[in-house]
Amino acid sequence: MIEMTNESPSVVVAALYRFVSLPDYVELKAPIHAEMVSCHVRGTLLLAAEGINGTIAGSREGIDTLLSMLRSDPRLADLEVKESFCDELPFKRSRVRLKKEIVTLGVDGIDPNDAVGTYVDPTQWNELIGDPDVLLIDTRNDYEVAIGTFEGATNPETHSFRQFPDYVDEHLDPEKHTKVAMFCTGGIRCEKSTALLKQRGFKEVYHLRGGILKYLEQVPQEESRWNGDCFVFDERVAVGHGLSVSEHVLCFACGWPVDREAQQHADYQPGVHCPQCVDKISDEQKRRFAERQRQLEQAKQKS
């Protein structure tokens, strides 16, 4: 096995999940982690009784070997995997974590294995969301929506996925909203959210198969109804059409993505604050963040 280094020209990034009953998920942790380490694959995998979720990165050989090991379990044979590529490893460690949910909605009894919305392939998504009777909802968080979303999509303005059930209860009505289409980064939050709506009595519920990432990969930019970039939860920060890495960076202070224009703003100071949070953090925090950034830059110069 060849270990990946930050000089590698092509790192494979695999976002994966599968809702499936895993009553023995605790026992699965050690062998999966051992295989990750053996394959020099980094990133985090979440295990719960309801399935598996995570994003990992490594060499082509390492990723293929780990996926083969996972799929050797018949329950994970249909593992949903979306791949992209970058020049540097976006993760530093190999981790497997045990969780109550592989994506936290916080509502008991919501199981996509029991009831879920209708999957719509990326090539058919434009036709669906072009229907004036369809309510299109972005199920992601506010900082994700801020840098890109589909034309005409409703932003629930949630700070975490846990807030989505409250949004549904307060703003959606199964009698009024007869057709609802939802999307998220890779598809996992939509499986949970469509299962929630089905439980709440909504009849026609649709979601984008493979999420935004699969849409950006398969749909040509000239036909796309996507505006902006798509936030991803690793050091790439965001990707665009064709899954090309964008020029966004993360603000250390608030965690919001900062685009190229905002990086030129007077209120952007790397590692300290950005235009989004400059008035929301204290002077003491700014001093601490500035000192941290100074030490990081000093360490980088010595390396």
Image (tube, rainbow, N blue to C red):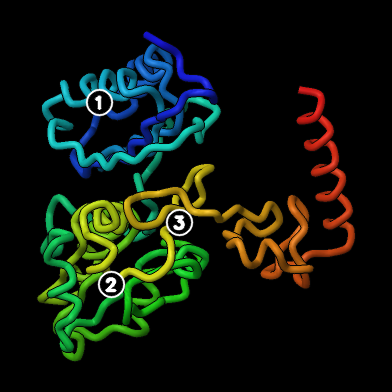
Task: Choose top left, top right, bottom left or bottom right for residue 166.
Answer: bottom left
- Using the numbered discs, state the Cα–Cα distance from disc 3 to disc 2 in whole angstroms: 17 Å
Label 2: few (<14), some or many (≥20) within 10 Å? some
Asked whether residue 116 is in view, the answer is no
Q: Depth check: 33 or 134 in front?
A: 134
Please give left or right for residue 61 compared with residue 38 in the image.
left
Of the two numbered discs 3 and 2 on the same chain, state the one appearing first in sequence.
Answer: 2
Of mark 1 and mark 2, the one earlier in the sequence is: 1
Q: Is residue 3 above or below residue 130?
A: above
The local secondary structure at tag 1 comes to helix
Pointer 3 local density, CA inside 10 Å: few below 14, some 14–19, many at least 20: many
Q: Secondary structure at mark 2?
A: loop
Q: Nearer the viewer's eye, disc 1 or disc 3?
A: 3
- Hey, what amino acid is under mark 2? Arg
Q: Kindly identify which numbered label has been placed on residue 67.
A: 1
Q: Position of residue 187 (x, y in %)?
A: 27, 54
State the SS at label 3.
strand
**Image label count:** 3
Residue 224 drawn above or below residue 90 = below
What amino acid is at disc 1?
Leu
Q: Are marks 1 and 2 in contact (CB under 8 Å)?
A: no
Mark 3 vs mark 2: give the one in front. 2
Q: Which mark is residue 231?
A: 3
Q: Amino acid at mark 3?
A: Phe
Residue density around tag 1, few if under 14, some if 14–19, many if 20 or more, within 10 Å: some
Counting from the top left corner in percent of width and height, residue 55 is at: 38, 38
Residue located beneath label 2 in the image: 225
Q: Earlier in the sequence, mark 1 or mark 3?
A: 1
